[in-house]
Image (cartoon, coloured by chain):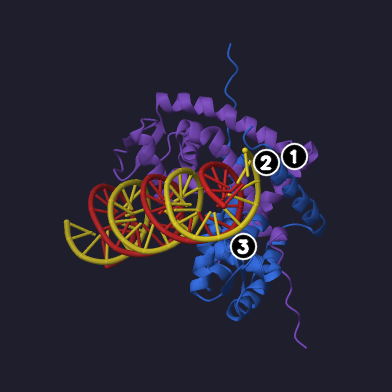
Chain colours: A purple, B blue, C yellow, D red
Amino acid sequence: MPAPTQALELENFLPYRLSILAQIVSEALHDRYVEPFGLSVTQWRVMAALGRFAPLTASDIGQRIVMDKVAVSRAVAGLMKRRLIERATDQADRRRAELRLSARGRAMHARIVPIALAYEKRLYEALRPEERRSFDEQTERLFAHARSLRGD
Amino acid sequence: MPAPTQALELENFLPYRLSILAQIVSEALHDRYVEPFGLSVTQWRVMAALGRFAPLTASDIGQRIVMDKVAVSRAVAGLMKRRLIERATDQADRRRAELRLSARGRAMHARIVPIALAYEKRLYEALRPEERRSFDEQTERLFAHARSLRGD
DNA sequence: ATGAATTAGTTTCATATGTAACTATTATGC
DNA sequence: GCATAATAGTTACATATGAAACTAATTCAT
């Protein structure tokens, strides 16, 4: 006789659980610092990357944070319009443009970072201190493994 | 002197890490069973919910899985058009309609479930068996905690 | 040196999603 | 009983996102 179909319990299905967890956290960020400052999540990520590593080109950003070049291009356009970042064409290779936060952008960045870190701290309260390291390490392994499973 | 701004290292920032992990897993699902069967992720979730708990109304589905009623309505419309689910208006309360998989829907569901479970199994290979339980429990706590932090 | 292939980045189009307004039906207060 | 509120679900609009086509600049092969 055929093997019975295994049951798929969505609420215990790892991909589903990861998805809704990420979603609810992302909504919280939106409420706390993205929406009040009029940024999209991707725009904020670009600002965060530039806050730490500027100057970066759009491609650099895409490599640093997991974001394709179209998303970076759109986020950059929005940030430029609001004068939160500055662009300087590389004279040696005029396809490239170095990006960095403007004074306005640095000021906003400095206001948002503490809010972001405070939220992360509160979120981590769900885990005991010794669990945090192992949880981070496990998410890292899951991420690397999921990547290695692509197209296979 | 003012406290120095703490650094926000995006690659170590929990919300960011959860987001990219969920995203890469979601892409893998898309490639494996959503796209081949022409379903969206939300459509598949509705089918999964009905596969286990039918009959359900659209509202029931929204409660079972984390999905607002507009998303459910759209997924249901798409699934109805492809005759993967059936709708029967509740005669006692004609606002409500009970949904269940059609024969076609059950057949597709039976084909997809093993693919989904096989992917989950491979994903879990990143964790040692004893880590899986604790990881699941920790994601559960994070989820509940993130929920409790909403609007606060 | 010049045509082909690469690379950086943008634009376009089709689709997905969230919010709010809307229809239809049922429940509630008086 | 009847007006009002609440509920189930859909539609409309505005915005977000992904894939592919496109422009411009540079590199490579010969």
Q: Which amino acid type is marked by label 2?
A: Ala
Viewer-nearest of discs 2 and 3: 3
Quarter the C terminus of chain A occupies: bottom right
**Where's residue A148, x and y in %?**
61, 61
Q: Badges 1 and 2: C-beta atoms under 8 Å apart?
A: yes
Q: Are marks 1 and 2 on the same chain?
A: no
Give me the disc on residue B146. Answer: 2
Q: Secondary structure at mark 2?
A: helix
**What's the residue at 58%, 36% (across, down)?**
B9
Q: Percent position (x, y) of residue A131?
A: 78, 42
> CB of mark 2 within 8 Å of CB of mark 3?
no
Residue corresponding to mark 3: B93
> Against B115, is B5 above or below?
above
Mark 3 falls within which chain?
Answer: B
Residue sitting at x 63%, y 60%: B61
Q: Would you say A65 lies left or right of A117 here?
A: left
Ranked by sequence position, the earlier of labels 2 and 3 is 3
- Residue at disc 1, secondary structure: loop
Measure the alpha-carbon separation of dots 1 and 3. 42 Å
Residue B98, image quadrant:
bottom right
- Vertically, is B50 above or below D5? below
Q: Relative to A18, does residue A150 appear above or below in the rendering?
A: below
